[in-house]
Image (tube, rainbow, N blue to C red):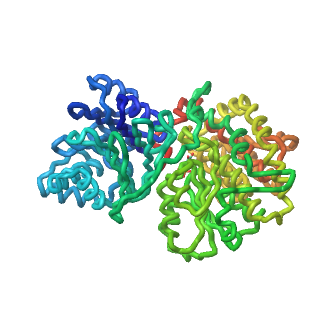
Amino acid sequence: MCGIVGYLGSKNALAPVIDGLQALEYRGYDSAGVAFIDGGAHLVKRVGRVDALAKAVKAEAKTKPHLAIGHTRWATHGAPTIINAHPHINQDGTIFVVHNGIIENFAEIKTKLEQLGYQFVSDTDTEVIPQLIDYHYKKLKSFDKAFEQALTELRGAYAIAMVTSEEPENLYAARLSSPLVLGVGKGEFILASDPTAIMEHTKKVVYLNDYEMVKITSKNYSIRNIQHSKKVRRVAETLDFDVEQVKLGDYPNFMLKEIYEAPQTIRMATLGRIRPESAIVKLGGLANVELKLGSVERILIVACGTSYYAGLVGEYLIEEIAGIPVEVQLASEFKYRDEPLEPNTAVLAISQSGETADTIAALQKVEGSGMLRLGVVNAVGSTIARMTDAGVYCHAGPEQAVASTKAFIAQVTVLHLLALKLSKGRTKLFKPLLKDLDELPKKAELVLAQAKNIERLAKKYSRFEDFLFIGRRLSYPLSLEGALKLKEIAYIHAEGYAAGEMKHGPLAMIDKQFGTLVIATDGPTLEKTYSNIQEIKARGGLVVAIATKGNRRIAKLADDVIYVPKSLEQTQTLLAVIVLQLFAYYAALKLGKNVDRPRNLAKSVTVE
Ligand code: F6R
């Protein structure tokens, strides 16, 4: 979703801002813009890619400005047009603002300002911000005060960066429920929505918290909490990031690169955390809540999309391994539900980005309830990572393709560890699971080695306009995830279903125009899944199955089979999902879709 970059420093500000916008492209956007201040103020905006903006900026810039802000916009209020693209300006053309999030009371503010003679040109909520700052500046004669005053009047969610031609040496920013991080380099400051836009320049970062504004000068930065009207001292922390991880290398796109990172992802999620020979699971991120964790009687998982499906897999794992009841809720629904909140329930938020607005809102809802708030998060230092009491990082590294792949693998791996940890060693699965997890990266490599076969089948099945994914037990949430992947990158209508539900409705759809992928890996319900395949075949449907190596029967039932190596029922989810990801990937490629940036979607969903 929208991306912000700002630069103030000794170099030409345009290079880090354009590079930064390019680094944020993966978040999804439809237009982009830059404002820079040299002798005067310049505003350049384009609909479409940052490349086009970069060319236009180059043509416009006659000097090397030291101050600039940039933005990639993912339309919420108003169509993706040049007028609606950011930066937005006051009517005098002196104040430039980029904004992520939604200003809920923008209509109210707009009406008030219109009555005072302000004229608006765009359909956006953002345009009220520079106009409101202008209004206060004219009265207060100070940008610090005008910026702060305007912020106190905004309701909703925002990350804002502002520059003004009146103060060519200052960069202002603020955040409320929308991510913003400040990179502190040598003689330079870079502001961005996430660290990917910063790490080429510095690893020292300051994360802004809600209700904080920052004023950056050429020498320093000062943070202020606008809710309590007081100064905040915060020193920069060091980012634990490898720049190479965000580069494509020899891969044609990020999605394939990230799918191929599955073995390393499992390794990184377990590294230093498991000792199979001595049956130990160590999760350092939970150390400070160990005691509280012992009295947890129920776990409520909140998440969205793929992370929600990882949570559904986690439900089976935690209930069956640790014996603790688990409920999984879509964060967007949980927020608006009125249900009893018990202090002995722990809330576990799962999120790759750590910035998903609905998941943040779900955590906010339980604030003050006495409930322990835990996180399984990938993005280090993200909002969710910081607002939870404790948690376990996924360590999957930056995920850039919009469709989540390696993050799901990391989340499910971590959920295995969490289930084992919560079991306090009381499960007979403890040692076998640890051994299995330890051996899993090699097995994941064997799945990837079958990419050619999966590609052939994905091409064959990509002709279907409707597709069903079915599975039982842990394979049921996997089927939901398989369907989501196919929908979002190949735009094929797909549904995930519990295989046992076929007779209760979906079977009516089956004919020879309908493809089904059956997850039929070894497990206690395999015989029942065979029956589902037979029912589909009897109605003329075409079936491709994912099965465990060594299963001879399946080849006689299904039209096509993709085999994964033998492992425990629990860890097979981590192998089968690689097949699902490659299947969707190759189907999308065959249909000529942009696999990294599917239409209408954004990577980090920072608005509700
Ligand atoms: C699907 C996908 C999304 C995300 C969802 C939650 O491939 O990527 O469904 O899983 O938007 O995002 P996070 O995990 O960042 O909270």
Please provide percent x and percent y for residue 55: 35, 24
Please provide percent x and percent y for residue 538: 75, 47
Q: Residue at x 47, y 34 (%)?
A: 201
Q: Which quadrant holds residue 79?
A: top left
For the residue pair 214 and 505, the one nearer the viewer reads as 214
For the residue pair 447 and 144, the one nearer the viewer reads as 144
Q: Residue reaching furthest left?
A: 117
Residue 559 shows up from this direction: no
Q: On the rendered image, what quadrant is the N terminus found in?
A: top left
Q: Residue at x 28, y 42 (%)?
A: 163
Q: Residue at x 83, y 47 (%)?
A: 567
Q: Is residue 153 left or right of residue 395?
A: left
Please provide percent x and percent y for residue 47: 34, 34
Q: Is residue 166 left or right of residue 234?
A: left
Residue 237 shows up from this direction: yes
Vertical arrangement, residue 297 with respect to residue 183, above or below: below
Q: Which quadrant holds residue 48?
A: top left
Q: On the rendered image, what quadrant is the C terminus found in?
A: bottom left
Q: Is residue 86 left or right of residue 452?
A: left
For the residue pair 549 and 98, the one nearer the viewer reads as 98
For the residue pair 321 and 377, the one nearer the viewer reads as 377
Q: Residue reaching furthest front?
A: 219
Vertical arrangement, residue 412 with respect to residue 61, above or below: below
